[in-house]
Image (cartoon, rainbow, N blue to C red):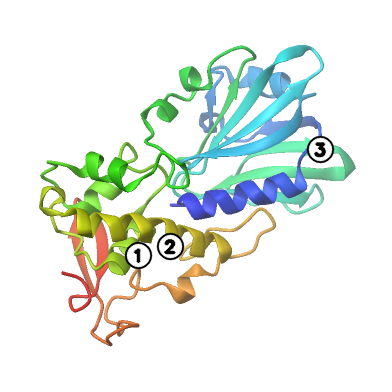
Amino acid sequence: MPELPEVETVRRGLNQLTLHREITGGCVLLNRTIAYPFSVDEFMPEITGSAIASWHRRGKYLLAQLTHSSHSSPIWLGVHLRMTGQLLWVHQDEPVHKHTRVRLYFQDQQELRFVDQRTFGQMWWVPPGVAVESIITGLAKLAVDPFSPEFTVDYLAAKLKNRRRPIKTALLDQSVVAGLGNIYADEALFKSGILPENLCLDLQLEQIEPLHTAIIQVLETSIAAGGTTFSNFLNVQGVNGNYGGVAWVYNRTGEPCRVCSTPIQRIKLAGRSSHFCPQCQS
């Protein structure tokens, strides 16, 4: 699943390529991709004629602020890539991939395609004057962003306090940290020297401080590398992310630790794989 660095990479690419371009039309190839409006026949007429003012990210959600000559209030287009979603900026002559779910047409024969093999991804149109959270309800459940000034050591400590659950499981909870997923939770725990199965309530402040720093550092490093491609993540121009080649522990089961050469181990926590070094983490 694309995590914060992958979604942020897509956001930056979209802001470089699509700003101030008008949506001239399009088509929906899989109806259930459109989460709102509930009538798919309304979706394309509502967004056609809108121009993209800017793209934003909240956790793993992408939000395009749209402008339209007939509306004075902001309009929003929301996208969640879920497991396998991709937003690709292509020429309309490009052959249509069999997993293409939505096509948005722009001038100069360009288009934005939503490709999604597993079909869990969603798109929303938010009417003018309507609160985004009332339509894209998952936004209301998100914690603060790791790059927000509100994401402090004290904030993280308060979120973890008295929780009788493994720290790895807690970090995957979007009501604790927005945007963090399996890859970067493993990486942050390695860099802070904490085993994934350690319970939150057992962590001391001197452990939470380096964890807070590590979360921000691994996310920044991955964004600089264009995200991670272990399966099918591509940026808007169809390019793989490069973070996987320098990952500390994620997806490196049995390989030597980059610090101490101990083989990386993998366990399952709450049904999710967790990778760690038994020597460097305790």
Which tag, 3 or 1, sits closer to the chain's start? 3
Choose between 156 and 51: the one closer to the eye. 156
CA gap, disc 2 and disc 3: 35 Å
Residue found 41% across the figure and 39% down from its top: 150
Q: Quadrant of residue 66?
A: top right
279 to the left or right of 191 = left
From the image, tell me which residue sits under label 2. Answer: 218
From the image, tell me which residue sits under label 3. Answer: 106
- Give the amino acid at mark 3: Phe
The reply to whether callout 2 and callout 3 are in contact (CB within 8 Å) is: no
Q: Secondary structure at mark 3?
A: strand
- Give the amino acid at mark 2: Val
Residue found 38% across the figure and 50% down from its top: 180
From the image, tell me which residue sits under label 1. Answer: 187
- Give the amino acid at mark 1: Glu
The residue lying furthest to the bottom in this view is: 261
Estimate the x, y position of residue 38 in percent, counting from the top left: 53, 18
Which tag, 2 or 3, sits closer to the chain's start? 3
